[in-house]
Amino acid sequence: MTIQFRDVTKRYPDGTVAVDELNLTVEDGTITVFVGPSGCGKTTSLRMINRMVEPTSGAVLLDGKDVSEGDPALLRRGIGYVIQHAGLFPHRTVLDNIATVPLLAGWDKRKARDRAVELLETVGLPAELGKRYPAQLSGGQQQRVGVARALAADSPVLLMDEPFSAVDPVVREGLQDELLRLQSQLGKTIVFVTHDIDEAVRLGDKVAVMRVGGKLAQYGTPAEVLRHPVDDFVASFVGRDRGYRGLSFLPSTGVEVQDVAQIALGSTLSAPNDGWLLAVNADKQPRGWLPPKSTVEGELTEADLVAGGSLYVQGTPIRGALDAALSSPASLGVVVDDEHRVLGAVVARQVLEVIEASPQGS
Ligand SMILES: Nc1ncnc2c1ncn2[C@@H]1O[C@H](COP(=O)(O)OP(=O)(O)OP(=O)(O)O)[C@@H](O)[C@H]1O
């Protein structure tokens, strides 16, 4: 389902212009992220899609149909909505929370409950949490329940307003991964609001950068916004390290994978080694590094090794190659295939040469 903002303006009764002449199309089956500093009108824009806020002028269209025509309650029931802190009903169990919308839609109790159990699994929560109350869950689990409840509407559109902002960064990354995994299966049209540019570029197929005063500053793919910010506001908002972030979108064409000296776990070392040796297991997966001039008594075990850096999966963007090279104790970034078998190594200097020669690096 496409969502179209056509000349949409929202002026609150006190005169605040929260959204100013917004024109933008959210494409079917994609994640579009509204990002910008506090007060720039992201939430107001989102809420005009399900008519929790009515535009002062202009129109929002769902698949070409003006949302202002028709019953707002019916519209809202048909659009999944997730907010910060999940917004769960505290006195209802997790399962009852998830089943809210199906019950409103007139499903019988049994069917709504079965659907809720299924959705709990979809969002990666164990079934036994279903009987608990929201306060008995962690923040991350509550957010997952919030997502499950929104999915229960089974609508093609999902609105998410800072859904992961209240959880710590590690849990947040897990939730983002989970959302991307779900989206690859479900293909919904998702509008996601955040003030965090990292979250925006990670999740968005498209990113709409907004500025205070409710104006759209730039709308494009994450790569476009990072590499070619249209003005100083966008450039400063995406940050000084945008060059590094932009590497997440630069292909690794031209990066040379060189041979790397290896040693198998369980083998013996006849003489001290000259250079670093990459230790691999029976499946040829890297397990760590053996420093130069090591002496190993008996068979090589993981206890003899120095931990390795990050791995670079061949074919993925160049940022991973640079990370692998810079994080390796041997200054050799380990290159692996999809099954994490060693293919060779990359060195930072050569990766940087490729980056410098790219249009982004120059
Ligand atoms: N009900 C309201 N009445 C008056 N002004 C409002 C109302 N709701 C929001 N605003 C104002 O409209 C502007 C945009 O608010 P909005 O919540 O859409 O921004 P936001 O980008 O989502 O901000 P945040 O990230 O802080 O939630 C702000 O100046 C805000 O104070």
Image (cartoon, rainbow, N blue to C red):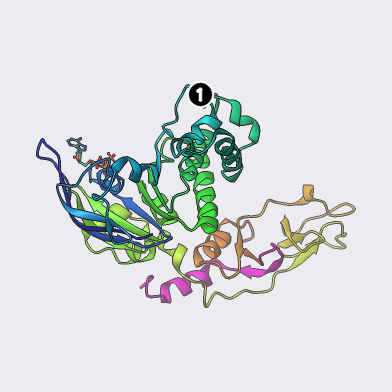
- Where is residue 83, by image quadrant? top left
- Which of 262 and 276 lies nearest the eye of the viewer? 262
Q: What's drawn in magenta, residue-wise? A: 338-362
Q: Is residue 348 magenta?
A: yes
**Rendered residue at 38%/70% (across/down):** 361
Quarter, ligand 1: top left
Give the tally of numbered discs: 1
Q: Residue at x 47, y 69 (%)?
A: 352
Give x and y (percent) for residue 107.
51, 39
In the orientation shown, which residue stands out farthest toward the top?
A: 91
In the picture of the structure, the residue carrying the numbered disc 1 is 135
Residue 310 spot, x, y in % from top left: 60, 56
Residue depicted at x 85% and y 63% = 271
Rendered-image quadrant of the C terminus:
bottom left
Q: 303 above or below 356?
A: above
State whether residue 99 appears in this view.
yes
Q: Judge from the rendering whether residue 335 lies leftward or rightward of residue 174; answer left or right.
A: right
Which residue type carries mark 1? Ala
Question: In the rendered view, would you say 338 is above or below 128?
Answer: below
Quadrant for residue 30, please give it: bottom left
Task: Specify whether residue 283 is painted magenta.
Answer: no
- In terms of depth relative to the viewer, which is nearer, 327 or 10? 10
Instruction: Residue 12 in the image: state x and y as whole percent.
Output: 14, 39
> Which image quadrant is residue 219 in?
bottom left
Q: Residue furthest right?
A: 298
Considering the numbered disc 1 on the image, is that residue within a helix, a strand or a loop? helix
